[in-house]
Amino acid sequence: MSRTFSGASAVAKTGVGLALAPALTPDGVADRPSFFHGFATHPAVFAQGLLTLADVTATRYFQYTPSNLRDPVLTAHGDRLRAECFSACNGVYARLDLLGSGFDGGDIGHGTTNVDVNPTMRSALAKVRRAELLHVDIGDDGLRVATPDSHAHERPVEMPDRWIRALGNVAQMHRPAVSAFSLDRRQTRAFLGSLPHATAAAQRGWLVPDRTGARLSPRPVPGGVYVNGLHRLAAAKRMLVHATGLTAYALGVGESPSVVEIDLPGARLSFGLTEEPWRGFSGEGSLLEALASPTVLDDADLVSALLAFEPIIDVARLSRDAALAPARTEGALAVLASSGRVGWDAHDESWFHRELPDDPARVRKDNPRLVAARALVDASAVSASDGAWTVANPSGGVYRASLGPTGGVDGSRCTCTWYMSHGTARGPCKHVLAAYLTCGGSIEENND
């Protein structure tokens, strides 16, 4: 099979989301290039893994309500396939990494598509047995699966627009992930078996390992991982008989988002949870500081041209190739993340590339606080005042903002209502951003 590249995909805008256009292959434009066709080495893991993602995206965990969404994003990286989705409430991110060892008799190419796992596909996947032959075909034509007794085909569907915003935020939020503890096979299966149903009331606390698996502690415990809403992991119960281990990642100190990663034969299944069940990834504002740099959009154009569906992006090499300082390269990747074009893998501690339609206007459209901050700067509403900044809203009100110790938004403060309500947990307020823009940002211009 010739390798396919959807790097030239154009944006197709609709009323509710984005669709991928025909892709560019080494032999020219192809309407239906195939990213992968071959057999799954662990058929039941592949089938149950996709069903797990379908369960997640079909569930609204905050004030439980079923949904008709079942459309994971599928990306082929040359050495693995990734399937990603968000819950209907946008507070759970799930990703299935299907590694090269999970496939046989096929060549994994490069490309991204978005499909709907509807009842027909669900029925076909649910019937797949451990030792049964399962043939898989993924490409711009969608997803096809076939066994000796059945087959199913799902065509690409539009990606919900808010998923694009959420993909960027989840990438930035998962970057600080630190492995807190791991469970062995026995502990993992015991823990998955004990998970509450998706309709259960939210349980909060610090997840810690014990002899029989893992439990929630009501108080902070060294090495524990904060989880608010253990029921949001309920879909993982599908993988109980396949699980071989589990790693829990902390994303910060105290009450913070978290990541739980389950090891499977030839695959990994990850769940990212927001700090609170009612909070969605699409509104977190985690990219605002990086997007505020005056050179970041031009840097992103340059870095984008150098990406090639890497499963693990080498930032140092990318910086050398782009002749940019590492901090500016990271800022450029943040811009690309805001368009869903790169993600973050906590296991590999690295960015990875997915090809979604390029939409330069998205940075402005999806970040109204940044737009408002730039308007304040343009209106000369920001002035230095006793080591801090005074920001006058044109519509009325004067606020005092201060940046963090390093000149960034970490540790910043403001007297506005947004800061009083959220602090910096959902990104900086427009007044702090305006102060940050006024002093030129904190991204270094050198190449050290």
Image (cartoon, grey):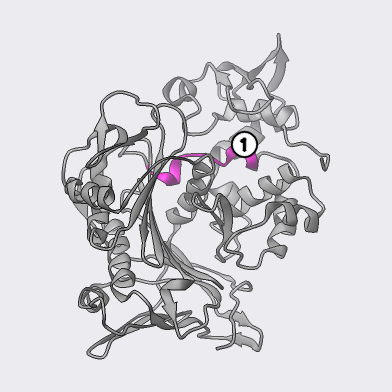
Image position, residue 287 (x, y; %): 57, 42
Image position, residue 102 (x, y; %): 41, 73
Question: Magenta region: which residues?
Answer: 280-290
Residue at horizontal 20 percent and vertical 49 percent from the top: 198
Residue at horizontal 44 percent and vertical 81 percent from the top: 104
Residue at horizontal 46 percent and vertical 86 percent from the top: 105
User: Could you say which quadrant of the image residue 361 lies in?
Assistant: bottom right
User: Could you say which quadrant of the image residue 391 lies in?
Assistant: top right
Does residue 155 appear to the left or right of 431 in the view shown?
A: left
Residue 288 included in the magenta stretch of the image: yes
Helix, strand or loop under label 1:
helix
Quadrant where the C terminus lies?
top right
Residue 392 included in the magenta stretch of the image: no
User: Could you say which quadrant of the image residue 185 lies in?
Assistant: bottom left
Image position, residue 396 (x, y; %): 55, 20
Does residue 173 appear to the left or right of 260 in the view shown?
A: right
Against 400, residue 178 (above or below) is below
The residue beneath circle 1 is 289
User: How many residues crowd around disc 1 within 10 Å: few (fewer than 14), some, or many (20 or more)?
Assistant: many
Quadrant where the N terminus lies?
bottom right
Amino acid type of the residue tagged 1 in the rendering:
Glu
